[in-house]
Image (tube, helix red, strand yellow):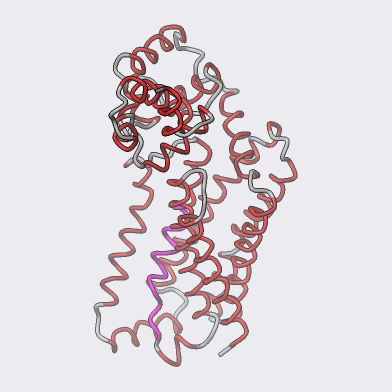
Amino acid sequence: MNISSYTIILFGAIFTFLHGLEQITGRIKNRTLGYITAIVMADVALILYNHAILSTDYVVTHRAVLVFYLTSIYAIGPLNFLYYYSLINNDITISHRLLFHLLPAAIVFLIELLYYLLPQYAHEQFITTVYANIINPFSILLFTGGLSFILYQIYFVYQCCKAFNYSYQQKGIFFVLALETINILTPLPVVLWLLTKQHHYYAIAGYMTTIVIVSLFLTNRRFPSLFDSIAEAIRKEKYERNYLSNINQELLHNQLLTLMTHEKVYLDPDISLHELSLKLKITPHQLSQFINEHCNMRFNHFINKYRVEEAKHLLSQHPDATILAVAYHVGFNSKSTFNKTFKQYTGQTPSDYKKNYL
């Protein structure tokens, strides 16, 4: 049993999990994106934990049961895709169509769950088969899951390459591409393990993933806006294709104003780019581009601007209304978010605004 490999990779698993936990406990700009990041980090931590086990002979000597290893492999690609999609498209609403990407992981989860329900002797027979034969159910599922992960990573590399000429963060894109290259190569040692059953190949895979996670953590601390700028460049590249070329933009502008000023759709706390685009009978990309180009702001800022204006009206016209009641009425889910957003747009808190107006 290689204690050093086990310890280093297990450290990577713990570090990754804590990094993900920070995304939902610290001060973050986009809470939904933070939750997605935390889930991605938790899945990577689970993969690293299993790699730590597989980098030793512990599975063979103690018949240790891996913890949903195949499920984590099948889930990491789609989870990364959900993160990239939310970051690039500036849309924090995860639709059923996007969640469909997780269907293979859900199926593999049920398969692993059934395996865990088998008696101990069945586990021992299965592990013996895995180590005795190159081709077996485990190796087939593992190879397919690794291939899926590679395809998802190539998708993001493709997006970054397209935006290279639109970003002033070209060095940052080179760095991200370098990390993505390591990610794409990570399944290679796993394939070598499938062929040879040499534990050090899993140690190499664990080291590679740990290096990527630690590098991302340090980069995010040193350059906190790097990934936002890259996402902005990708969005800019998409807008160059001009999604609005065949749309009557004046009519779209009037329809959007009607929804915001008369129907007040922003009062819905669950309003999203996708839902608003359905009301306008255009795609989310078209609406996002229109708001960015004609209003010079992102969708969330566009909605919050109307919510703050409505809140100012209520605070001035209904002095007996509580701050919390006003916050919920205009579409915010919490008083703290309302206070922060209101101050961002007006320079004062709702309480101060109410006092000054009266």
Residue 220 picture location, percent across and down: 63, 53
Decide if residue 142 is in sight here. Answer: yes
Residue 135 picture location, percent across and down: 44, 73
Give whichever of 350, 155 is nearer the camera. 350
On screen, residue 212 above or below 314: below
- Range covered by the magenta-colored residues: 64-79
Residue 142 found in image quarter: bottom left
Q: Is residue 299 left or right of residue 320?
A: right
Give whichever of 279, 200 is nearer the camera. 279
Question: For the point 61% across and 29% down, which residue is it?
Answer: 237
Decide if residue 78 is in sight here. Answer: no
Count how many numbered circles sit on residues in the image: 0
Question: For the point 45% across and 46% down, which residue is it?
Answer: 31
Question: For the point 32% across and 64% down, which residue is it?
Answer: 109
Q: Is residue 188 left or right of residue 272?
A: right
Residue 182 picture location, percent across and down: 64, 59
Residue 331 found in image quarter: top left
From the image, give the main secondary structure of the stretch colored magenta.
helix
Residue 62 found in image quarter: bottom left
On screen, residue 350 above or below 203: above
On screen, residue 284 above or below 60: above
Residue 71 included in the magenta stretch of the image: yes
On screen, residue 267 above or below 134: above
Residue 225 picture location, percent across and down: 64, 43
State which quarter of the image contains the N terminus: bottom right
State which quarter of the image contains the C terminus: top left
